[in-house]
Image: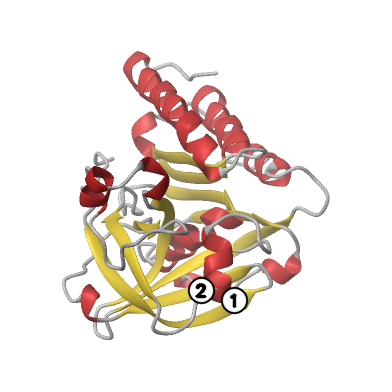
Amino acid sequence: MAERPARQAPKAQGAQVVRTEQITPHMVRVVLGGEGLADFALSGFTDHYIKLCFAPEGADYTHPFDIAAIRESHPRELWPTTRTYTVRAWDPVAREMAVDFVVHGDEGLAGPWAQRARPGEQVTFLGPGGGYQPQASADWHLLAGDESALPAIAASLEQMPAGALVHAFVEVPDASEEQKIVTPDGVAVTWLHRGDRPVGEALTAAVKGLDFPRGEVQAFVHGEAGFVKEIRRHLRQERRVPLEQLSISGYWRLGQDDEAWRAVKREWNEQVEREQETGQAAT
């Protein structure tokens, strides 16, 4: 299978909210547009992402802003905070970008912002970046994730090669969080309802219980770091899937806010790098 393309270096850009839509009880879509997206373009990945930049209360700068310049001229407490989100869809004709947010009331930073965002509101973001897209050379595809990975999984399903054999598992709280996804050749999503079970329990069981088809698999596994690590171990140790056929990342971690997880995630990524060097599955 071809090597994964290098990630793009992000750049700061400006946009404005065009409209919002309540997709499910806990998923809000924010559509961004405006002249700031005149030069915006994607590179073919299905997990393209941007980093939204949020100015703290009391900041005296306006959108779009230069993060490097702010860090040189302002104290740390006035630096903008970034949050990473998948580009769910990009319309190059209308110059509109859709970004989906998981929202749990006032919890977090980006979710509450998406819930109250109004047309005309200005935003600054970095990107896009990306690193995964379904390859026609794979014999079959495995997609697995929780609701945080749903936008990337949906975008990947919509761009699967014709005739692709796909097993897609998405874990959500309950049936109300399921979404209609247009897939090629009638590829179906297996929706797993979490209920009162721990995050990722149903998803991990589904992947481990799957009767793997013959041939080379290309896998995309993203979401809460705990179950992502367990599935990664299963794919590497028990299924012997080569690293170059895996796209795996912990988008968030249970019990940690985004800032704390970002610090720990560096160590998690270093562990993956060590695995790549040794060829052994990390524990």
Report the amino acid beneath label 2: Arg
Please say if 124 is above or below 96: above
* Residue 176 spot, x, y in % from top left: 73, 71
Quick one: quadrant of the C terminus? top right
Residue 23 badge: 1
Q: Which of 272/207 is in front?
A: 272
Q: What is the residue that sits farthest to the top in this orientation?
A: 278
* Residue 86 spot, x, y in % from top left: 42, 59
Q: Which of 110/170 is in front?
A: 110
Quick one: quadrant of the N terminus? top left
Q: Secondary structure at mark 1?
A: strand
Residue at image coords 21%, 69%: 40
Residue 29 badge: 2
Q: Is residue 43 visible?
A: no
Q: Which of 193/111 is in front?
A: 111
- Res 208 quadrant in image: top right
Q: Is residue 45 visible?
A: yes
Please say if 271 is above or below 219: above
- Res 158 quadrant in image: bottom left
Q: Secondary structure at mark 2?
A: strand
Labels 2 & 1 near each other (Cβ < 8 A): yes
